[in-house]
Image (cartoon, rainbow, N blue to C red):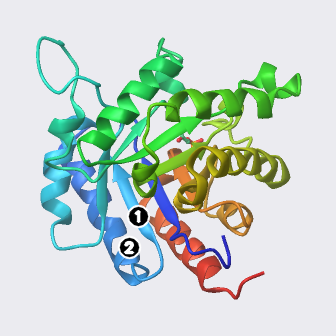
Amino acid sequence: MPGTARRPLLAGNWKMNPLSAAEAIDLARAVTPAVRQHASVLDVALFPPFPWLRPVWDAVQGTEVELGGQDCFWERAGAFTGEVSAAMLAGWCRWVIVGHSERRALGETDEDVARKAAAALEAGLRVIVCVGESEAQFVAGQTAEVVRRQVAEALKPLAASSSERLVVAYEPIWAIGTGRNADPSHADGTMGVIRQFLGQAFDAGGDAIRVLYGGSVNAANVASYVELDGCDGSLVGGASLKAEEFSRMIAAVAAVSWSPAA
Ligand code: PGA
């Protein structure tokens, strides 16, 4: 990240937590001071469960905290029980995550992810497209091939003009929620593969697309990723539920982005 024109992004994916609106509001409010303090150098987005979007939206009004949904459906409206459209999210959110491995594990395909990403961009949202290899693929040395295919499939239908609203998060599945964060050199190599693809697919626009690392990132290790030239921030799960730790992560990312270009 040091020396790039891209603004760092720290994204907090709360997954199916917390259990009550009151706790969600408290969590959002508790990270607001750190967001404010460092808003000149980085973007911070929170991804609460759908029912908490409205109360959290109320709680962060007038602050720099950005909000997003954890998923969306590709149709705008209609008979799709249980789904939430990108157009609906656009009323409350700036962001949406698509293709998280926990959704892919429930049956979501590359084609589904591509349709969701396209619908989200169409609705005016900023989109984090998640990609990453399984442990077996990692062990077999197939990371680059798997990730390149996932990125190519997800971004295929997208116009180059939308590139400034696109983010790609590289999250090795074996590193998510396990405490086994990927070695920064492995993350660096894979993010390099992603950036090379983006450069080819989007020409000059590819340079504006932020690439994040995710998977057991916390306050102690976040700097080792964002210090990498090809890493523009992080998608954080478990550590984003701890206000004090997430605030320290915000400060750590800000400190790297202030440091002189490597
Ligand atoms: P983790 O989750 O930080 O808890 O590993 C990351 C994610 O799923 O985005």
Coordinates of residue 125 in the picture (x, y in percent)? 29, 48
Q: Dot 1 corresponds to which residue? A: 44
Give the amino acid at mark 2: Val
Q: Which mark is residue 23?
A: none
Residue ID at (67%, 86%): 259
Above or below, 154 relative to 250: above
Q: What element carries label 2?
A: helix
Q: Dot 2 corresponds to which residue? A: 35
| Contact, mark 1 vs mark 2 (Cβ under 8 Å) | yes
Q: In which quarter of the image is ligand 1?
A: top right
Above or below, 13 relative to 153: below
Residue 249 lies left or right of residue 21; in this view the side is right
Residue ID at (30%, 30%): 72
Indicate if the residue with disc 2 has its beta carbon within 8 Å of ligand 1: no
Coordinates of residue 115 in the picture (x, y in percent)? 38, 25
Residue 227: tell me if it is visible. Answer: yes
Nearer to me, 72 or 241: 72
Give the amino acid at mark 1: Val
